[in-house]
Amino acid sequence: MSFQTQAGVRYWIFDSLEEGVAQAIYTRHGGVSPEPWASLNLGGTVGDDLERVGENRRRALEASGRDPATVFDVWQVHGDQVAIAEAPRPLQAPHLQADVILTDRPGVTLMMRFADCVPVFLHDPLRKVAGIAHAGWMGTVKGTVRAAVATMQSRYGSAAANIRAAIGPSIGPDHYEVGADVVAQVRQAFGKAAPDLLQMRDDRTFFDLWGANRWLLEQAGVRQIEVVEICTACHLEDWYSHRAEKGHTGRFGAMIALK
């Protein structure tokens, strides 16, 4: 796992996914947006100028060797819907609502945006399938990554044991305090595993999104899992954090594509 910098754009790549895919989780460095989005904001719905967001996207993708015209992205809705990308999404076309995107087309670049939720990359090197998932607490409770693995199996014939997964920077269990309603849903969704995912400190409860998504992947049969364990709220020098910055912030991008 390591940071890379190209043309001023700083991004993270996973060692376990270096073969067969292009991949990046972009930090907030290398863009043109001013505060509070400084500087590589890729979110178009957070108040930033859309021309700046477009320039940021161009810079990010070109730093990774990907053509912005190859992007397929979605309207993320904190669910478990899966979108299949067979071609790039034309800019004038409406976004599908989904929190998982899968493709077996090397000419398509899958892209999502984050600011505390968990980015999960998926790659089956045998069936040559790549995917990306967006999992906040709602998506985690709904089993977003489980839906991703199940669709890779049903649509592409992937075997879970062959799938490589990587869990990227997101808000960590040290900062992710949740209320009674979320606690109840976590307990219902995770059963006997819930006590290990809900940490109590000073009468406050914190939810471990990294551990929960790893558990879901393991329950789905995935064994090759890399977890970065970088907390976005702890490292505002690199990442946007909706929680730590009280909503006044941007969105960092993540992309994966078959080579």
Image (cartoon, rainbow, N blue to C red):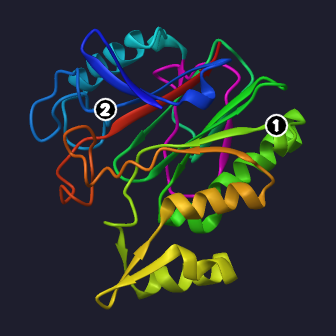
In the rendered image, residue 258, in percent from the top left (x then y), is placed at 66, 18
Q: Can you tell which mark lies on residue 162? A: 1
- Report which residue position mark 2 lands on: 27
Quadrant where the C terminus is found in the figure: top right
Residue 222 seen from this side: yes
Task: Name the secondary structure under disc 1.
Answer: helix
In the rendered image, residue 119, in percent from the top left (x then y), is placed at 50, 44
Q: Is residue 216 above or below residue 1?
A: below
Q: Locate residue 164: give its quadrant.
A: top right
Which three-letter amino acid code belongs to the residue tagged 2? Thr
Circle nearer the viewer, 1 or 2: 1
Using a 10 Å C-alpha cutoff, classify the residue at mark 1 as few (fewer than 14 neighbours), some (14 to 19) or many (20 or more): some
Mark positioned earlier in the residue sequence (1 or 2): 2
Main SS category, magenta section: loop
Which three-letter amino acid code belongs to the residue tagged 1? Asn
28 on left or right of 186 = left
Q: Which residues are magenta?
A: 71-93
In the rendered image, residue 245, in percent from the top left (x then y), is placed at 18, 55
